Image (tube, helix red, strand yellow):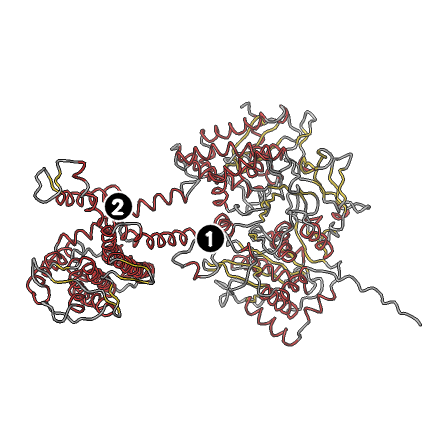
């Protein structure tokens, strides 16, 4: 008698669309997403979400999208972004996200570089950008637009397709070839590229980092399911607000992947301007922000308190002193409460903290994170003091954002946290560069083998380009980007971002760029925060007209002088800023001074404001 | 796409997150509001067992006055049509109610009908009169309208004095409407659901329930399309007409609705008091109601109630004054510099002047300011 040994069934490969399908069949009438429309948050259930994904998937097939084709999306965060992304992955194509702020030149570069065949453009603004360069993009076949206003029945380009018509196309294809999308999903392999995420490109043209299905699965397992960020891991009782660009890996994690794998309820902010209002309505339990967002919330609170009544100001100042003590004690205790801070927080909650958190929309926040750029520890401490559980995390597109995180309960301020237990992370002895190796490391840059070779070495280590050091053997502290380290004429290595962030702790400073590579001393270019400084000037009855006018008021220069002097006391004398100049304009993505993620392009700055810098080194004052 | 379910704690504690228009436009859209209203209603229900009968009578009167004040606020506060003729409509309601419910064998005309008939009828007769007056309002505004409505009061006073078969004549009067509902008498002590209630306790409850109904109706009129049209007419009638608000229709509607409220209030007022004196529907009564609106808060329903309660309780308070200030006499003939009735009239005047200067939004404004102070915490807005 022989027994035939059945070969073990291959482990069911999970995928992000597969997770959504499972949720739709398990709890199809539960709410997955909410979008605000005419003042009301409209529910989209898992059933509706999955059904639309399948229809859009069929639509893509009907348009001739084949395995590995690129589908580009240029839109603000909205359900259609996620639906198209998931449908693209379901039919084994690659999603490429553009920032809604990308100007025409960048749109052309990104679409051309990625060879995208389909573009989902949100509205007339984005359609116009694409149409301006469409003739130079022979591969681009269809431009699907969501908002018909100004486009439908006005524009005649045959490549334009209205979203509703696209859905009809999908439905027709679905009735003719039902199950085609599901078959595609079944054929998917872990090596499929699912996302093409362009780096912000502070130094050169953006490079497209490819992420495979296996990368994404590893990131979901580490960050979401094993609770790499939150403790306990996210569930379907968690609520988030989606507002940062989905073309960035961080928002993709917190919106798309958290939602698909943990089922947490995503609310789409109406626009970046309405984020404070939407935050207050939604009161998310998990909230991720880039440093600029946290600095802005902090600055807004300061302005609004400044215009409050005397008693309220006094109350705020008193309890913020308590908060800073709570913050310090918690920092010393790894982010955990002690008996005394718990008591102080409980009393402070009644007088200030709870109301304050309610106003800024973080009252229910059980996990707040800052990442994507360095942040000043003072800002983190401020939030910890009022009872927002703040965590600095670190990762980059190239390792699917899996590197280190401050875990709840073992926070070290000023560090980016501990490496996850399932990954390898080391710091290069010579250069101090941080290297990571794990299944989340990306397969390479899109059509750029040279850059890939420079980034991933023969042993599979990813060179992050960040310089770091160990703190107490467990936590990693990042000094700066390798390329940004300043070596002064005296031969001292200085990290500009630490000084810059310290300057930006002041609510009056929006941008600070420290310069001094191969120079005798450090100087800085400083851009003021128009809202706060404007408010400050108004209260002091200093008349002003424009940003430039306000920047150059002697009183404002003096105000900034004070901020600079404050910062100088925190650093060694070689790291002090000897001179500074005010930036004559607000830095802007459109003008090429910032990247889409609002990071300063140092090279562009040196070019545009070179005369200001030279003048500082020449002049005697 | 609405109506999905959410998991437990994702639903609670987000008062500003509306997922339907029903929730967004609900009258009590936040939990503090629901709790506060529930507490106020609960308090109002137990009050009759805590206070003496004569205080209850004043409160019942205050509730009825509130209905009248809401009516005046709808036409004057919301729609901006100054009306000094409110006393006339109150009188119409009172006599309609009295005639319909009165003893058929009595000295004056009576038809012996029950509350369910005479109460709406009182409102409708007054409303019809309001509709008749409305054409003047369409053509006039401001001071001129005030003068016309003032004329109405004198016209009414004359009619009430002369039509003795209905009104009973000056100095005599006639019994007020009888609050009888399917044989149940609100104006006689008796057992209700096993609890022994006095006349005043029953009256209190009846007036409280009616006020509740009229106030909710008033609030809904004010915040619906009609109320918005009223506000548009008030803020600038020409602009309102330009944006498509039919002036004639809404001015007429304002007077009609307001008069309906006044008719109801008039009938109920004399149910509580018991006897109608035809001479009491004079200018002073109109001024009293205007004082309620101004002191309570222009263009607010809860302000109307606050003002009405305040003005109705005022005599009760001034009556205590002679105990502390000996130069004010307690009666009309008691010597001293002033008597309490003069003091009362002076206080009306002072209060109106004081509120107009220092708190134009009235008692309601004081409440709103206090509320916003804490609502804005820890900021100022």
Residue A31: image location, x then y, percent: 56, 61
The 10 Å Cα crowd at callout 2, few under 14, some 14 to 19, many 20 or more, is some
Q: Residue at x 66, y 32 (%)?
A: A486
Residue marked by disc 2: B360
Question: Which residue extends farthest right?
Answer: A1
Tell me: A159 left or right of B357: right
Tell me: A179 left or right of B265: right
Does the rendering let one see residue B112?
Answer: yes
Discs 1 and 2 share one subunit: yes
Whether residue B82 is situated above or below residue A157 in the rendered picture = above
Specify the quadrant of the image occupied by residue B214.
bottom left
How many discs appear? 2
In this view of the protein, which residue sits in the foreground, A182 or B184?
A: B184
Specify the quadrant of the image occupied by residue A605.
top right
Q: Residue at x 66, y 41 (%)?
A: A406
Q: Chain of mark 2?
A: B
Tell me: B127 left or right of A514: left
In this view of the protein, which residue sits in the foreground, A530 or B213?
A: B213
The reply to whether callout 1 and callout 2 are in contact (CB within 8 Å) is: no
The 10 Å Cα crowd at callout 1, few under 14, some 14 to 19, many 20 or more, is some
Question: Quick one: label 1 or label 2, which is nearer the N terminus?
Answer: 1
Label 2 secondary element? loop
Label 1 secondary element? loop
Residue B183: image location, x then y, percent: 25, 69
Give me the disc on residue B15. 1
Tell me: B332 left or right of A433: left
In this view of the protein, which residue sits in the foreground, B364 or B203?
A: B203
């Amino acid at each position: 008698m022989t027994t035939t040994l059945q070969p073990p069934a291959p482990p069911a490969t999970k995928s992000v669309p597969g997770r959504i399908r499972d949720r739709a069949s398990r709890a199809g009438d539960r709410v997955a997403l909410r979008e605000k429309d005419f003042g009301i948050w409209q529910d989209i259930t898992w059933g509706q979400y999955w059904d639309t994904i399948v229809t859009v998937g069929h639509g893509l097939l009907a348009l001739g999208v084949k395995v590995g084709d690129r589908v580009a999306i240029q839109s603000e965060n909205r359900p259609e972004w996620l639906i198209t992304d998931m449908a693209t992955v379901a039919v084994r194509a690659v999603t490429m996200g553009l920032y809604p702020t990308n100007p025409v030149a960048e749109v052309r570069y990104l679409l051309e570089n990625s060879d995208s065949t389909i573009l989902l453009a949100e509205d007339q603004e984005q359609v116009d950008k694409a149409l301006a360069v469409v003739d130079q993009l022979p591969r681009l076949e269809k431009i699907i637009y969501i908002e018909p206003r100004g486009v439908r029945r006005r524009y005649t380009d045959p490549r334009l397709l209205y979203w509703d018509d696209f859905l009809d196309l999908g439905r027709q294809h679905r009735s003719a070839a039902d199950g085609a999308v599901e078959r595609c999903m079944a054929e998917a392999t872990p090596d499929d590229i699912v996302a093409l995420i362009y780096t912000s490109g502070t130094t050169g043209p953006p490079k497209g980092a490819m992420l495979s299905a296996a990368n994404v699965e590893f990131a979901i397992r580490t960050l979401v399911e094993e609770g790499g960020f939150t403790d306990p891991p996210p569930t379907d009782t968690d609520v988030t607000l989606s507002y940062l660009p989905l073309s960035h890996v961080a928002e993709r994690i917190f919106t798309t992947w958290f939602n698909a794998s943990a089922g947490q309820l995503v609310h789409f902010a109406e626009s970046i301007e309405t984020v404070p209002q939407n935050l207050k309505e939604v009161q998310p339990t998990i909230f991720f922000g880039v440093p600029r967002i946290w600095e802005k919330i902090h600055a807004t609170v300061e302005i609004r308190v400044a215009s409050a009544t005397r008693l309220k100001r006094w109350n705020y100042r008193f309890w913020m002193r308590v908060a800073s003590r709570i913050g310090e004690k918690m920092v010393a205790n790894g982010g955990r409460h002690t008996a005394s801070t718990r008591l102080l927080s409980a009393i402070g909650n009644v007088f200030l903290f709870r109301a304050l958190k309610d106003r800024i929309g973080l009252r229910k926040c059980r996990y707040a994170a800052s990442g994507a750029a360095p942040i000043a520890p003072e800002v983190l401490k401020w939030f910890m003091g009022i009872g927002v559980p703040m965590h600095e995390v670190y990762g980059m597109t190239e390792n699917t954002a899996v590197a280190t995180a401050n875990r709840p309960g073992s926070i070290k301020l000023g560090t980016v946290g501990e490496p996850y237990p399932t990954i390898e992370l080391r710091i290069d002895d010579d250069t101090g560069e941080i290297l990571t190796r794990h299944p989340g490391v990306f397969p390479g840059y899109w059509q750029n083998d040279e850059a890939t070779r420079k980034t991933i070495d023969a042993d599979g280590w990813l060179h992050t380009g960040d310089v770091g050091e160990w703190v107490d053997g467990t936590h990693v502290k990042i000094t700066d980007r390798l390329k940004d380290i300043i070596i002064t004429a005296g031969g001292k290595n200085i990290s500009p971002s630490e000084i810059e962030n310290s300057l930006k702790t002041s609510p009056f400073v929006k941008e600070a760029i420290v310069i001094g590579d191969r120079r005798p001393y450090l100087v800085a270019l400083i851009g003021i925060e128009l809202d706060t400084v404007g408010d400050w000037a108004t209260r002091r009855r200093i008349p002003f007209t424009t940003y430039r006018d306000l920047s150059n008021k002697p009183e404002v220069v003096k105000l900034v002088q004070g901020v600079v002097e404050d910062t100088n006391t925190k650093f060694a004398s070689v790291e002090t800023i000897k001179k500074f100049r005010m930036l004559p304009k607000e830095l802007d993505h459109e003008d090429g001074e910032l990247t889409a993620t609002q990071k300063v392009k140092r090279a562009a700055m040196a070019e545009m404001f070179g005369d200001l810098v030279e003048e500082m080194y020449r002049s005697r004052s | 796409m609405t109506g999905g379910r959410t998991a437990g704690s994702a639903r609670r504690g987000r008062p500003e997150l509306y997922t339907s228009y029903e929730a967004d436009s609900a009258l009590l859209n936040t939990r503090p509001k629901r709790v506060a209203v529930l507490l106020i209603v609960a308090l109002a229900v137990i009050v009759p067992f805590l206070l003496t009968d004569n205080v209850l009578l004043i409160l019942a009167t205050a509730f009825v006055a509130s209905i009248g004040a809401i009516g005046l606020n709808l036409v004057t506060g919301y729609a901006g049509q100054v009306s000094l003729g409110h006393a006339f409509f109150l009188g119409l309601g009172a006599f309609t109610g009295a005639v319909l419910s009165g003893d058929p064998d009595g000295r004056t005309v009576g038809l012996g009908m029950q509350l369910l008939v005479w109460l709406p009828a009182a409102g409708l007769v007054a409303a019809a009169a309001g509709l008749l007056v409305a054409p003047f309002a369409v053509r006039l505004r401001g001071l001129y309208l005030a003068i016309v409505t003032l004329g109405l009061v004198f016209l009414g006073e004359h009619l009430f004095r002369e039509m003795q078969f209905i009104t009973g004549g000056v100095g005599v009067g006639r019994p007020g409407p009888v609050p009888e509902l399917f044989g149940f008498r609100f104006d006689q002590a008796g057992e209700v659901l096993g609890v022994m209630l006095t006349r005043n306790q029953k009256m209190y409850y009846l007036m409280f329930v009616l006020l509740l109904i009229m106030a909710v109706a008033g609030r809904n009129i004010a915040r619906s399309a009609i109320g918005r049209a009223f506000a548009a007419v008030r803020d600038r009638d020409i602009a309102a007409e330009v944006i498509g608000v039919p002036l004639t229709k809404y001015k007429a509607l304002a007077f009609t609705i307001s008069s309906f409220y006044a008719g109801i209030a008039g009938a109920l007022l004399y149910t509580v008091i018991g006897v109608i004196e035809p001479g009491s529907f004079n200018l002073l009564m109109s001024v009293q109601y205007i004082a309620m609106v101004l002191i309570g808060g222009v263009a607010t329903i809860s302000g109307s109630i606050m003002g009405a309660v305040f003005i109705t309780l005022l005599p009760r308070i001034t009556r205590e004054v002679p105990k502390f200030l000996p130069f004010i006499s307690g009666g009309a003939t008691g010597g001293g510099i002033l008597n309490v009735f003069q003091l009362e009239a002076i206080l009306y005047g002072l209060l109106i002047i004081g509120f107009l200067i220092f708190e134009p939004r009235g008692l309601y404004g004081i409440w709103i300011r206090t509320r916003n102070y804490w609502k804005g915490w820890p900021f100022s807005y």
